[in-house]
Amino acid sequence: MSRRGGKQKPASLDDENDENPTLETELVLASDGALHVSFEGNPPRGRRVFVGYALTAEECAELGTRGLLTWAMLQTLALGSDGAVYVEAGAIGAEGREVFRGYAATPEEAEQIVDDLHRAAWNLTITARRLIRAR
């Protein structure tokens, strides 16, 4: 997926030379309740598409929780898997911002995604506990 004119490289814990690793945004959960999946090319036929631009950390801090929630009632906001808040295209300027393009998951797809995330989180927790005990 294109971000700032180029493809982001997924973050890697192995690359010690990379001072600024980036995290690919695969999913966003939008304020309308939809889970959107990133795509390149064309989305599946008939799917609603969300295009959003990321707010900076400074903008999020300035708006605060109340400001973000108020904005979410007026525009679609989405929380990305990269931790960024994405605002629906047209509400803010795109210049220099991270971009997310994703199609709305079906209820079945969303359920599978949540199950997969839950399984991954469980496996990560178990692995972390084993590593801590091994110290």
Image (cartoon, rainbow, N blue to C red):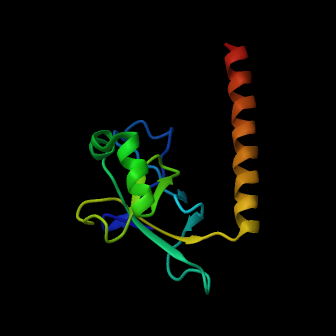
Q: Looking at this view, is 9 or 57 the one in front?
A: 57
Considering only vertical position in the picture, is 69 above or below 64? Answer: below
Q: Position of residue 77 (x, y in %)?
A: 44, 58
Query: Which quadrant would the N terminus be assigned to in this image?
Result: bottom left
The answer to whether any part of residue 24 appears in the image is no
Left or right, 131 with reference to 15: right
* Residue 10 percent across, percent down from the top left: 48, 52
Q: Position of residue 134 (x, y in %)?
A: 71, 16
Image quarter of residue 58: top left
- Which residue is rendered at x = 75% and y = 30% of the image? 126
| Residue 21 shown left or right of residue 49 in the figure | left
Dividing the picture into quarters, in which one does residue 87 lie?
bottom left
Image x and y of residue 119, in percent: 76, 45
The part of the image, by quadrant, that contains residue 71 is: bottom left
Near-viewer residue (53 or 21): 53
In the image, what residue occupies the spot 59% across and 71% down? 104
Residue drawn at (71%, 31%) of the image: 125
Farthest residue in the top direction?
135
7 with respect to 129 (left or right): left
